[in-house]
Image (tube, helix red, strand yellow):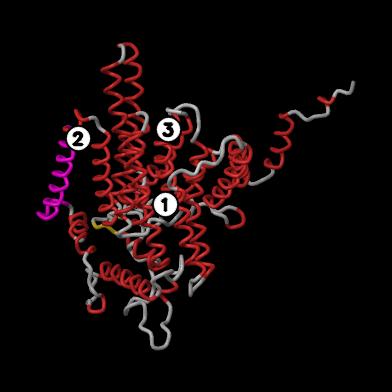
């Protein structure tokens, strides 16, 4: 009988054949190809690896360029798309899960597509912006696919995802702290006293603060949940087992507490006023969500904690007003109210002290003018800058106000920004999406099956609130940070879904 096993190459020979060309390549290329092949193999095995890679790629997307001009994040997005399609087709018995938030996401994309069709400016720019937003439902669906319907409420996939959601921002925060302390950065980022506003690898302090606001609520919530778990272990377990579990949980508690501290310190040293206000909104909702989740006998302690936190914020404001804080920090705190004040830039006298505030208001007024001129479908997704810098037609008033002729890219208020780019249809769809997220967050908190999922639900609720408030001052739907946000929204769906699966 013919022995076919001798004609089939062994796995070792296949590996040698693949490794031989790599030996003659430059180290940088060989390393990149090896990592890419390893990631591709892992993704074929389990789609969660594509999800991990996409989230971890966000901080380095501007640092590494792949052949063909692709960024690392763009490459992982293609990998995500292929992985989602492949694993969905390979397991027809597990249909693709959509969740409660897919409908509002699809409706918002439809509003953007409508604005793309009727844009009076560039359809190519509108298409690029639409593709950027498509990454949000893509990562949302992949998260539901990778984690949904898995055996066990706390499997390794969830632990790995939480680690990625915290590790990438924490490392960026650590870099931002180094930049702040040693004054590394352009002069325009100066914070006084030889320090520099933290910006990490994100490029801008305000966007960096937005990245921090998409991580610290989850870290803080997991820290609180781990603290409760340590107390329960010490009180309820047997002595020998309690000592072992207490030691492990205490190490995790210290790690999560350290990550929370680094993220909050990074946010503070960004000196982003919008980021600070967004963090206050996130902290408030985080406290309220915790109050909802706690049993009645513990709510009194939570109320006292909120009172102490409120007193601390009040003390911070008093110290800033009394000159007890560093001048740079006190100045940023004092200017928050100025940045929230609405006024007509046409009558403003620009000085070095009010330049940033007047420039911000000029962009806000320009967005309002765009919305008034195109109230239904706007100027088109991604066309804010083109509309801002365009010359007015004969007999029409210009969109911008002198001397502001160069756009900073967004309206410094995402709600006005989306109204300008996608009109009333886009704004209504976006607000419906946020309302759906709020409803989903409430259901996730009420139906979370265990302490881990409850901590995840509370943390993701705090992230959503921080983004909602921070978007009053910035546009956080940039730089592929939607991968972080879309994943947290999927976790809110999963937190409620785990409860349903336990009762089937």
Q: Is residue 351 left or right of residue 144?
A: left
Residue at (47, 30) in percent of width and height: 156
Q: Label for residue 500?
A: 3
Residue 310 part of the magenta-drawn span: yes
Of the pair 494 and 328, the residue shown nearer to us: 494
Which residue reaches farthest left? 322
Compare marks 1 and 3 and give the one earlier in the sequence: 1
Is residue 475 something one can see in this rendering? Answer: yes
- Image coordinates for residue 293, horizontal then vertical, percent: 27, 34
Q: How many neighbours does mark 2 have within 10 angstroms: few (below 14), some (14-19), or many (20 or more)?
A: some
Of the pair 140 and 21, the residue shown nearer to us: 140
- Image coordinates for residue 342, horizontal then vertical, percent: 23, 68
- Callout 3: helix, strand or loop? helix
Residue that badge 1 annotates: 201
Residue at (35, 13) in percent of width and height: 241
Residue at (38, 85) in percent of width and height: 396
Residue that badge 2 annotates: 302
- Callout 1: helix, strand or loop? loop
Residue 36 part of the magenta-drawn span: no
Of the pair 483 and 504, the residue shown nearer to us: 504
Q: CA distance from mark 1 to mark 3?
A: 40 Å
Residue range highlighted in magenta: 301-325
Is residue 178 something one can see in this rendering? Answer: no
């Amino acid at each position: 009988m013919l022995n076919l096993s001798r004609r089939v190459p062994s796995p070792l020979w296949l590996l040698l054949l693949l490794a031989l060309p790599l030996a003659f390549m430059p180290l940088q290329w060989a390393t990149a190809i090896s990592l890419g092949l390893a990631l591709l193999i892992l993704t074929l095995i389990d789609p969660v690896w594509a999800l991990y890679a996409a989230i971890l790629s966000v901080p380095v997307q501007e640092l590494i360029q792949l052949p063909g001009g692709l960024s690392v994040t763009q490459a992982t997005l293609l990998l995500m798309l292929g992985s989602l399609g492949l694993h969905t087709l390979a397991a027809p018995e597990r249909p693709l899960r959509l969740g409660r938030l897919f409908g509002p996401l699809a409706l918002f994309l439809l509003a953007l597509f409508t604005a793309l069709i009727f844009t009076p400016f560039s359809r190519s720019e509108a298409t690029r912006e639409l593709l950027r937003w498509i990454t949000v439902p893509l990562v949302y669906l992949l998260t539901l696919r990778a984690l949904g319907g898995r055996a066990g409420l706390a499997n390794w996939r969830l632990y790995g995802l939480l680690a990625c959601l915290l590790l990438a921002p924490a490392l960026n925060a650590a870099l931002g702290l180094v930049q702040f302390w040693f004054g590394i950065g352009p002069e325009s980022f100066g914070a006084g006293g030889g320090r520099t506003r933290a910006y990490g690898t994100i490029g801008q302090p305000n966007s960096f603060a937005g990245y921090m606001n998409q991580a610290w609520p989850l870290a803080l919530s997991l820290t609180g949940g781990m603290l409760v778990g340590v107390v329960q272990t010490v009180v309820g377990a047997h002595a020998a087992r309690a000592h072992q579990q207490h030691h492990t949980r205490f190490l995790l508690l210290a790690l999560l507490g350290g990550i929370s501290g680094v993220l909050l310190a990074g946010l503070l040293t960004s000196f982003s006023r919008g980021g600070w206000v967004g963090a206050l909104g996130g902290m408030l909702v985080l406290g309220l969500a915790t109050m909802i989740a706690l049993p009645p006998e513990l709510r009194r302690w939570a109320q006292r904690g909120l009172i102490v936190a409120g007193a601390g914020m009040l003390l911070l404001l008093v110290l800033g007003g009394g000159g007890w804080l560093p001048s740079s920090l006190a100045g940023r705190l004092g200017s928050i109210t100025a940045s929230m004040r609405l006024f007509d830039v046409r009558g403003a006298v620009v000085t070095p002290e009010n330049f940033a505030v007047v420039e911000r208001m000029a962009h806000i007024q320009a967005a309002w003018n765009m919305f008034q001129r195109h109230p239904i479908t706007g100027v088109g997704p991604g066309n804010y800058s083109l509309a801002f810098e365009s010359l007015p037609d004969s007999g029409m008033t210009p969109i911008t106000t002198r001397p502001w002729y160069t756009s900073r890219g967004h309206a410094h208020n995402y709600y006005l920004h989306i109204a300008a780019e996608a009109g009333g249809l886009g704004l209504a769809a976006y607000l419906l999406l946020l309302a759906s997220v709020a409803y989903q967050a409430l259901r996730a908190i009420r139906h979370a099956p265990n302490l881990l999922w409850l901590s995840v639900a509370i943390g993701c609720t705090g992230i959503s609130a921080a983004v909602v408030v921070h978007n009053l001052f910035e546009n956080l739907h940039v730089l592929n940070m939607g991968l972080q946000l879309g994943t947290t929204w999927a976790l809110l769906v999963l937190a409620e879904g785990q409860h349903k699966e336990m009762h089937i």
